[in-house]
Image (tube, grey):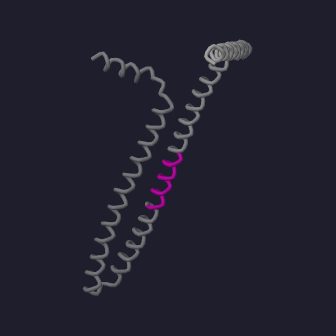
Amino acid sequence: KNQIKMSFMDKIFGKKKTPKEIMRQYKRSVDRSVRELDRERVKMQRQEKKLITEMKKMAKENQMEAVKIIAKDVVRTRNYVTKFYKMRAQLQAVSLRLQTLKSTNEMMSAMRNVTRAMSGMNRRMNLPAMQRIMQEFSKQSEMMDMKEEVMGDAIDDTMG
């Protein structure tokens, strides 16, 4: 019930949609339009078949004036079907563009997050302190190597 009130309030005051929601809405709208065009095209093709059968029937009855009128209707119907195919292709191209925009937006978002992470790491890294630590490590490592060598020589002298 609380969720219903929120959505009702959102409808009244207008909740701001995210770009992702807007893109989804546009894609749904384009897809719906493509389906509607397909339905209309199928209706037109059915109508064309009916006109052709009627034209054949009229031709058998030798009613040539009616055949000419029906033939013009068939041509007009075929032109509309062609227009529906073209419109469908254009809508699919728009859908593809929307998908490309969405992908580009996702890529930009990922790059933004990586840049933030890199800048955070760069801020946390203290190069002078790191250099001092590395120098101290190198110095201590050399001292240990020398001590190890002296101890090795002492052991060799006692054994040998």
Q: Is residue 144 visible?
A: no
Q: Is residue 113 left or right of residue 71?
A: right
Residue closer to the observer: 79 or 91: 91
Q: Quadrant of residue 66?
A: bottom left
What is the x, y in percent for residue 82?
A: 45, 65
- Residue at x-position 62% and y-position 27%: 115
What is the x, y in percent for residue 149?
A: 68, 17
Residue 87 among those drawn in magenta: yes
Residue closer to the observer: 139 or 150: 150
Residue closer to the observer: 109 or 46: 109
What is the x, y in percent for residue 112?
A: 60, 28
Q: Quadrant of residue 41?
A: bottom left
Picture layout, residue 25 above or below residue 113: below
Q: Is residue 112 visible?
A: yes
Residue 160 among those drawn in magenta: no
Q: Is residue 105 left or right of residue 4?
A: right
First to last magenta residue range:
85-97
Q: Is residue 1 left or right of residue 11?
A: left
